């Protein structure tokens, strides 16, 4: 009996041949598979829709350089204001705390002394740890010390907190110039440095204006305390926004890193070795001692009658400066990391710039100090009126500092000597306008405006042109040197030209006429110092700055 294989009928009932039925069966199978995939895909899509979508990473824009400039210049303005703001409040501080003359002078000078001693140290710490981190650290110290100064109950407490406040400023201010150098380039750097210069020196007049306003207001019977407490809300605001809006510019590669392939492993311990070699502790000690021995006799010498120890310490300061220079040169030759690189100290423009910046700032501070003594003591101005007297100087300095780059390029070489000459003329004009014991009238306004414009022309272009010659990796050292020169210039100006004024007035200000005569002698000395700054433009070799 013959068996037959049963035929599987296709679902369509097609009775065609075997090949056709097989093809039809294959198509049916494919269709079912496609349906299953479609159903599975729909179910998978449905389950995926029920699951929360993964979060996409948020790409943050880098902070705008304008925010960085605004934050660091605001911090700088607070620190610079506190160099001068206590001058106007000094009589109220003395009456409230029953401070002696020496105690009051230490209240004023304690900030300056610690600031000058630690300034270059702050610049080096910024290079080692990070300029952003050190700026915020210094700002926190400065803000906390300002609160403590405003709450001080005794003269000793106020002196101690002023030293701490100066230390915070020394950690903060060097980072400002370094961050500007590393963030901005070309024309934007010149504009940023112009703003830096305007804030730095306008703070001298601005501090006296703000101090007079706050003391005159006598908020809630607090007297002098708001001159310190005003820093607290501003500092807290900067500390709140600074971590988000400040960024650390990338450091230029070291020579060894530039030669190493990008994927090559770093030798073990190299980072630690770099950090250890970066902090020049013997150099720090020598420099701090030299600056301290220089500043203390300048601050206390006038009140103590310039005793022998003042001259001895000044001489020792010069010896320590020579020892510091010799040690730094030797350390660099051994391949170490000196606090101030000899290559920076010998860089084109640096030596002469240091002298001229110190001279310009000394004239600025000396003029403001002597004129403050005259208008408050000789002319009997209130603190507010005395502070407002300096508005023309502050405005002119700020406007010129921001806009001198608009001058034709062929004039730029003449701005520094021209600024010193204009300052010399303005000092002479101010002395003549006030010499008869009156308020000087409109001629004093002209002289004060000219002094601000002249000193700004002498300072801002010099700073910009000097830093343009410094390598980016040397920005921290160069900024520390130049800012220290400016700070020591301010201290020297108050000490030297203040001594000239007080000596000419026989230590007192008995009348408007005697005070006017003392101011005239001081203005002649100031004009001579400014003329020296102008004549330095003839120096062709020192610092290679023409």
Image (cartoon, rainbow, N blue to C red):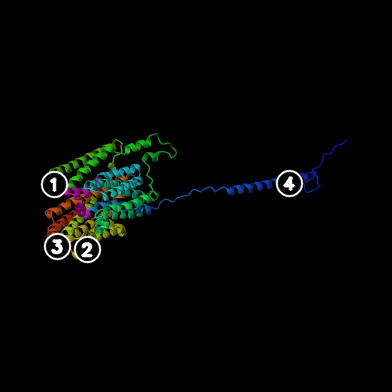
Query: For the magenta stretch, what is the residue range?
Result: 88-116
User: Which mark is nearer the camera, 2 or 3?
Assistant: 3
Query: Which residue lies under the disc numbered 4?
Result: 28
Q: CA distance from mark 4 to mark 1?
A: 113 Å
Q: Which residue is mark 1?
A: 306
Q: In the drawing, what numbered circle is on residue 355?
A: none
Q: Are marks 4 and 1 in contact (CB under 8 Å)?
A: no
Q: Position of residue 64 (x, y in %)?
A: 40, 53
Identify the element where label 3 is drawn.
loop
Q: In the rendered structure, which disc, 3 or 4, sits on the residue that comes first in sequence?
A: 4
Q: Residue 411 magenta-drawn?
A: no
Q: Which residue of the protein is positioned furthest toward the right in this rendering? A: 1
Q: Which mark is residue 445?
A: 2
- The label shown at residue 437 is 3
Q: Quadrant of residue 206?
A: bottom left
Q: Position of residue 498 (x, y in %)?
A: 17, 53
Q: Nearer the viewer, residue 261 or 55?
A: 55
Q: Main secondary structure of the magenta part?
A: helix
């Amino acid at each position: 009996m013959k068996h037959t294989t049963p035929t599987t009928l296709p679902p369509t009932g097609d009775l065609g041949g075997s090949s056709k039925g097989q093809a039809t069966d294959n198509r049916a199978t494919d269709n079912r598979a496609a349906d299953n995939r479609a159903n599975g895909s729909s179910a998978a899509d449905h389950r995926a829709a029920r699951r929360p979508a993964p979060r996409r990473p948020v790409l943050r824009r880098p902070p705008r350089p304008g925010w960085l400039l605004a934050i660091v210049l605001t911090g700088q303005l607070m620190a610079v204001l506190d160099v001068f703001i206590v001058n106007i409040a000094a009589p109220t501080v003395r009456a409230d705390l029953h401070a002696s003359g020496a105690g009051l002078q230490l209240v004023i000078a304690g900030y300056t002394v610690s600031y000058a001693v630690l300034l270059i140290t702050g610049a080096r710490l910024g290079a080692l740890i990070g300029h952003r981190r050190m700026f915020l650290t210094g700002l926190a110290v400065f803000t906390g010390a300002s609160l403590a100064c405003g709450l001080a109950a005794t003269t000793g407490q106020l002196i101690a907190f002023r030293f701490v406040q100066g230390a915070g400023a020394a950690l903060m201010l060097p980072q400002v110039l370094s961050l500007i150098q590393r963030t901005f380039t070309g024309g934007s750097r010149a504009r940023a440095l112009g703003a830096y210069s305007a804030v730095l020196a306008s703070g001298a007049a601005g501090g006296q204006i703000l101090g007079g306003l706050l003391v005159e207001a006598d908020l809630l019977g607090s007297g002098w305390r708001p001159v310190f407490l005003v820093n607290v809300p501003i500092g807290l605001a900067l500390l709140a926004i600074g971590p988000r809006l400040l960024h650390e510019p990338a450091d230029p590669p070291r020579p060894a890193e530039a030669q190493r392939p990008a994927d090559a492993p770093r030798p073990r311990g190299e980072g630690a070795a770099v950090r250890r070699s970066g902090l020049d502790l013997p150099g720090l000690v020598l420099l701090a001692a030299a600056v301290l021995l220089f500043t203390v006799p300048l601050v206390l010498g006038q009140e103590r009658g310039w005793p022998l120890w003042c001259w001895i310490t000044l001489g020792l300061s010069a010896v320590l400066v020579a020892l510091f220079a010799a040690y730094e040169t030797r350390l660099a030759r051994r391949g170490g990391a000196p606090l101030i690189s000899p290559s920076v100290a010998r860089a084109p423009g640096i030596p002469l710039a240091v002298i001229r910046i110190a001279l310009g700032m000394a004239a600025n501070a000396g003029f403001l100090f002597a004129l403050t003594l005259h208008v408050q003591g000789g002319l009997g101005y209130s603190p507010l009126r005395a502070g407002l007297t300096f508005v023309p100087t502050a405005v002119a300095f700020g406007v010129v500092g921001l806009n001198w780059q608009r001058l034709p390029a062929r004039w730029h070489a003449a701005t520094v000597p021209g600024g010193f000459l204009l300052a010399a003329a303005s000092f002479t004009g101010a002395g003549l306008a006030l010499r008869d014991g009156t308020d000087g009238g409109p001629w004093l306004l002209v002289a004060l405006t000219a002094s601000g414009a002249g000193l700004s022309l002498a300072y801002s272009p010099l700073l910009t042109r000097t830093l343009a010659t410094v390598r980016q990796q040397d920005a921290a050292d160069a900024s520390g040197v130049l800012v220290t020169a400016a700070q020591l210039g301010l201290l020297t100006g108050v000490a030297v030209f203040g001594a000239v004024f007080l000596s000419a007035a026989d230590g007192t200000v008995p009348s408007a006429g005697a005070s006017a005569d003392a101011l005239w002698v001081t203005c002649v000395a100031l004009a001579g110092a400014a003329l020296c700054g102008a004549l330095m433009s003839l120096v062709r070799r020192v610092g290679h700055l023409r």
